[in-house]
Structures are given as structure tokens and as C-alpha cells.
Amino acid sequence: MERLVILDRDGVINRDSAAFIKSPSEWQPLPGSLEALRLLHQHDYRVAVASNQSGIARGLLSESTLQAIHQRMCEQVAEAGGQIAAIHYCPHAPEAHCRCRKPQPGLLLAIAERFRVALASVPFVGDRPSDLAAATAAGARPVLVRSGHGQQCAAELPAGHSVAIYDDLLAFARQLTHSRQ
């Protein structure tokens, strides 16, 4: 059985920026995120990334620049001993009302189709309400990290919510793999 984890990018794996990540040099991993990706890889989890990247539609970066950013991310993950199996992103502006922009489920459904897995037990780790909504809409298991915008998102969750919350990606990976590394 395929073991899959889906992650949001900005605020979960790397530092987020209100001005967008527009170049490879602006991509900076969050503390512990590379270690988390190594841990997931060591425990035979495939990792896919699902990320809104409206900076393309806004003219802030090109598709080729985004590919260079993702190459830098994958290289740093590999150097740490991890691996990212797939990256799916939405290049559209929010006004496009597409099916791939989170909170819509399109990115997650595309990942499920690519890996031929049902999403019912697959965690989708994010830091925003749109990530949690996309996970729920796709039938995945929503997971919130307090990094990025997660602290604010956690504070706004309704009482009695069923969303698992972790301090960061490393805390999630340690719990998922039952590891103390």
C-alpha cells in the first residue's frame, strides 16, 4: 500500500513571504523542515507538494523561475536525505475561481490520481484555512502546523474541531513515524 503525505509549501516547508517567494535565493527552509522530509523518506513515505502560486498570474515570477525555486527546494531536500516525489501547483489568481486553487480540492485530487491512492487516510499538512478546506473537500486528513500562518489559523478554529495540530513539520513527521530522531 502506498504511503503518501501531501504538504503545502510556503509556511510549512519554507519561510513564507507576503511579497511572495520570487527567486530561488528567496526560498529558505523552515527550521526542522529538511529533517522532517528526511525522516518521512526514511520511513518510506512519498511526499507530494500542493501549493497555490498566484505570483505567476500576478506577473511576479515566471513558470521557469518557479521551476528553479522548486529545483532548489528539491536539491536541499535531497542533500538532507529526503525526497519530494511530486509538486503540483496552481498558477492562477484567486479571481480565476479555478478548481486547482486551494481551498478547492483540484491539486489534491490530481496528486491522488497521479499516485493512484484514495485520500481518506492521507494527511495534508498546511498552515492556512484554505489548506484545511482543500483537505476536507478532497477527502484527505487535514493537519495544521503552527509555522507560517498556522498559529493564527489554530486560534480561529471552532471549538470541538477535529484537526490535528503540530508545532511544525518536524513535530508532525516525528509523530507520524513514531520517531525520536
Image (tube, rainbow, N blue to C red):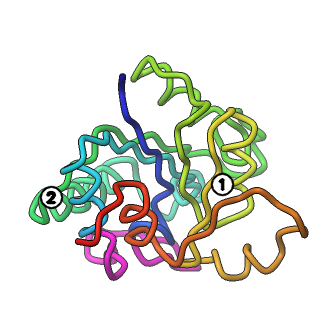
The residue at 50%/26% (across/down) is 112
**Dot 1 or dot 2, earlier in sequence:** 2
Using the image, tell me which numbered label, if any, was put on residue 75. 2
Segment tinted magenta in the rendering:
14-33
Mark 2 and mark 1 in contact (Cβ < 8 Å)? Answer: no
Which of the 4 image quadrants contains residue 15? bottom left
Q: Nearer the viewer, residue 90 or 33?
A: 33
Which of the 4 image quadrants contains residue 140? top right
Horizontal side, residue 58 vs residue 68: left or right:
right
Horizontal side, residue 54 vs residue 87: left or right:
right
Regarding mark 1 in the picture, which secondary structure is present there? helix
Mark 1 lies on residue: 131
What x and y, as percent, mark residue 164?
64, 61
- Which image quadrant: the N terminus? top left
Look at label 1 and name its amino acid. Asp
Examine the rendered structure and indicate whether residue 179 appears above or below residue 153. Answer: above
What x and y, as percent, mark residue 69?
30, 60
Please name the predominant secondary structure of the magenta segment in the image: loop
